[in-house]
Amino acid sequence: MEYKEFYFEIDDIKFYANYFSDKLINLNIIENIPQNIKESNPPLKLYDYLVGYLSGCEIEYSGEYQLNLTEKEKIVLENCRKISYGKILSYKELAEKAGFKNGSRFVGNVMAKNPIILIFPCHRVIKSNGEYGNYGPGVNYKIKFLNIERRDKND
C-alpha cells in the first residue's frame, strides 16, 4: 500500500491529488504549489481527464478512486456523479435523487467536503433560487467550470 501525492498545473489551475494503492482519494485546486514541493506528473488517466475536461470535452474519468466517506455521503456523491455534463441540479433535487427527502442541508455539507472535485462534479449543484452557492476552491472556479460546460453545449 503506497501513498502518493502530486502537485501539477493545467491551464493556470493548480491541482493537488492524492493516491493510495493506485486509487485516487483526493483531487482539489490549490492556490499555490508549496515552494518546497516540485511539480509532479499525475497518473495519465487523471491528467488526460483534466486536460480534456478543461478543453471543453465531455469526458468520463476511467481511473479508480476510493471515497473515504460514510455510506450516505457516498450515495450523494455517486448521484452527483450522474449529473450530466452541462446540466445543473439544486441541492434539493440532488437530495431527492439520492433518496434523502428534505436532505438539502446534508447534501450541501457533502458537497462542501467532496474529496474529488470535477470527477464528482459538485460544481453542478446550485441553490434552489438559482444562485451558485459555495464551492470549496472558490465560486469563481464553479462559474468557470459551468461556463466551460455551457460553451461546449453552445458550439
Image (spheres, helix red, strand yellow):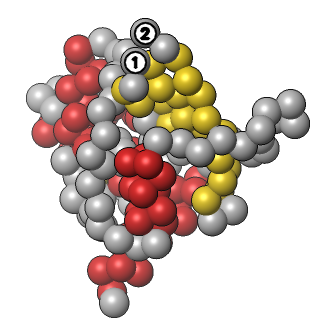
Label 2 near label 1: C-beta < 8 Å?
yes
Question: What quarter of the picture does the C terminus occupy?
Answer: bottom left
Is residue 146 visible from the viewing direction of this image? no
Q: Is residue 48 above or below residue 96?
A: below
Give x and y (percent) for residue 76: 25, 30
* Residue at horizontal 79 percent and vertical 33 percent from the top: 37
- Judge by depth and name the residue closer to the eye, 87 or 27: 27
- Judge by depth and name the residue closer to the eye, 64 or 120: 64
- The amino acid beneath tag 2 is Met
Q: Residues within 10 Å of mark 2 (few under 14, many from 20)?
A: few
Give x and y (percent) for residue 52: 41, 65
* Residue at horizontal 23 percent and vertical 18 percent from the top: 72
Question: Which residue position holds label 1?
Answer: 21
* Image-based side of 33 in relation to 76, left or right: right
**Element on which disc 1 rests:** loop
**Which disc is residue 133 wearing?**
none
